[in-house]
Amino acid sequence: MALLEVKDLHTSFFTDAGEVKAVDGVSFELDRGKVLGIVGESGSGKSVTAYSIMQILAPTGKIVGGSVKLDGTELVGADENILRKVRGNRISIIFQDPMTSLNPTYTIGHQLVEAIRLHTDRNRKQAWDRALEMLQLVNVNEPRRRLKQYPFELSGGMRQRVMIAMALACEPDILIADEPTTALDVTIQAQILELMQDLQKKLGMAIIMITHDLGVVAQLCDEVIVMYAGSICERGTADEIFYTPAHEYTKGLMRSIPRDENNGQRLQPITGTPIDLLNMPKGCPFAPRCDHAMKVCLTERAPRMQVGEAHFSSCWMNVKDAADRGEITVEGGQDHV
Amino acid sequence: MSERQNDTLLEVKGLKQYFNINLGFFRSKPLKAVDDVSFSIRRGETLGLVGESGCGKTTVGRSILHLYQPTAGQVIYDGKEINSKESLKEFRKKATMVFQDPYSSLNPRMTVSDIVAEPLDVHHLYSTKQERNDRVLELLGYVGLNSEHASRYAHEFSGGQRQRIGIARALAVNPEFIVCDEPVSALDVSIQAQVINMFDDLQDKLGLTYLFIAHDLLVVRHISDRIAVMYLGKMVELADAEEIYSHPLHPYSQSLLSAVPLPDPKAARANKRIVLNGDIPSPLNAPSGCPFRTRCPHATEACAQSMPPFEEVDKGHFVACHRVREIG
């Protein structure tokens, strides 16, 4: 059984302008000790997927359907007491902005000790020792002094290390990292990614890495999910996604970023503008920007097709290609990933 | 040599930009945001300027345009030094800027046509209303917008479209030189490529020269002819784009380039990262001598004594490092 099982998750935000379907039928599994990347543009629903798993949505947001199972235990609709034991203990999250995720009025030590004591039955002294141990683990220099400092005295990279230390203090099974390095400089980003890789190997936890940076994904992830407009358009191993992308959106992304293959050539951008979630098209959400859109793309969602061993894509082009080869294996008909 | 000199559009000599930081009780200390930077930009080229936050790359762009009054140094444009009100006014008709944040750099109370026409108003570049309108439509056409967009307000547009409006405004005075300050870093990946291509096209069409400031090294490599690397207010390396990627000589450039996460899993696995220890020192307490010595794996005693000169070690390849001949 997979460690985490997300099935047909739907999360909506109810705003004055109407219902925004931020996550629209997302399913995936995560095994112990694996690194799963979720990539997509802003508004694609990658962060909301993570917040739905943790159930820390803003008050206007609500999970309207689907299930999230951790080790077989259903989390959607679960009692707050159960959720409290899951959050921080079994699933932890680090947020994008290390500047604002720490409380500026308490010392680093206070905040670490608070988190540790909340989740374990250590006393103050033991919790303090644990906090020190965690800071050493994430390579913070002079950890003893840092514990007595306030967040403003630390640099961005240092604060992100503190956040990682806090998230890992209870040895969670799953670490959700929501754009953990976006606010950091390149050389600091390299330090943090290296650290996460080391800790992942050392502690054997699973990581869900949410990012828009394809470079970070290539570096860290075993498996990758590509999201667009609230749904998964493609899922596969990192190599499959980068070298043999199947969905037209993923292909477009790969052509539009500067990399070695297209060095010196003109980039091929994806045309059009990102989708307005309040006015979702009926068919494939990417169809209005897709160069290969067919009639069916505008009216119906594409089914999820298996295009490789663990490689799935929801694109009518894949259906067409498979039909051309006369080997259609459509999985689940209506079930559009 | 003379031909190359004629080729130079903009020359920056010994540029210094210090800001006084108030420490209370009438004490203040200069923050050396840019400290003795010299370089030149050739007509029609794109010079990429990279570095991490706080290294002074944005300040260089702004000081060139005299948005800050430089503390010291010369900015020579087309052979004329910018040192008087008149020369600055002329200069501003030829040199403009595209800002990083497309959300805060457009006035929310002005229509798009007023935003784009503001430089025309300032420099009195039209005689009739009709002329102003025509020019606005022409400018919007350059960036892929049309008359329908002209009467709307900035908030009605997406990030990518706003950046186009900012670019149209920068083009209004028919400039020769544009400082692009992180123009694509606030945009989504799929939109970035559209805007990068637009910069390329406009350069071909209008013969523009760019100073392209960015921290995304893959984007800079794509768009630039030459690249300059800055660290803590100093320029540490300058060379042709391909040269700097294949043979970075300064230890900082080497680690910076190796730290870039490559969007290619096989290359990422093979990549040997040079991970630096520690953080960038505060520019208020910059290290003595070479600013990079506190994080440099090759630093010696001599590095703490004096700032290495910015020398040409190979043809067109400038480096500021005492030990460049030993480690390069």
Image: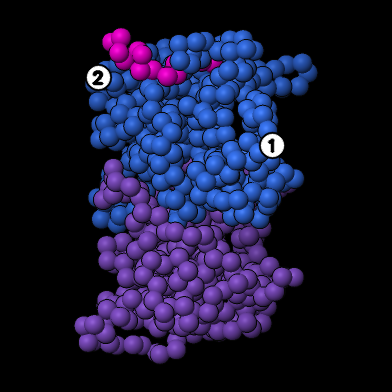
Chain colours: A purple, B blue
Q: Residue at x 31, y 15 (%)?
A: B4
Snapshot quadrant of residue A23: bottom right
What x and y, as percent, mark residue B90? Answer: 58, 18
Residue, far left? A325
Q: Residue at x 72, y 44 (%)?
A: B110
Whether residue B50 is visible to the viewer of this picture, yes or no, is: no
Q: What's the mark number on residue B284?
A: none
Which is more N-terminal, label 2 or label 1? 1
What x and y, as percent, mark residue A303? Answer: 40, 83
Residue, far right? B25
Query: Is A323 contained in the magenta span?
Result: no
User: Could you say which is closer to the camera, residue A291 or residue B265?
Assistant: A291
The residue to which callout 1 is attached is: B129
Of helix, strand and loop, which one carries label 1?
A: helix
Snapshot quadrant of residue B133: top right
| Circle count | 2
Of helix, strand and loop, which one carries label 2?
A: loop
| Figure quadrant of the N terminus of chain B | top left
Query: Is B11 contained in the magenta span?
Result: yes
Report the side of B264 relative to B162 (left or right): left
User: Could you say which is closer to the camera, residue B101 or residue A138?
Assistant: B101
Q: Residue at x 45, y 11 (%)?
A: B79
Query: In the image, what residue type sits under mark 1?
Result: Lys
The residue to which callout 2 is attached is: B315
Residue, far bottom? A333
Query: In the image, what residue type sits under mark 2?
Result: Lys
User: Could you say which is closer to the camera, residue A223 or residue A115?
Assistant: A223
Whether residue A127 is visible to the viewer of this picture, yes or no, is: yes
Q: Which residues are magenta?
A: B1-17
What x and y, as percent, mark residue A31? Answer: 39, 74
Q: Is residue A261 above or below residue A87?
A: above
Q: What's the chain of the residue with tag 2?
A: B
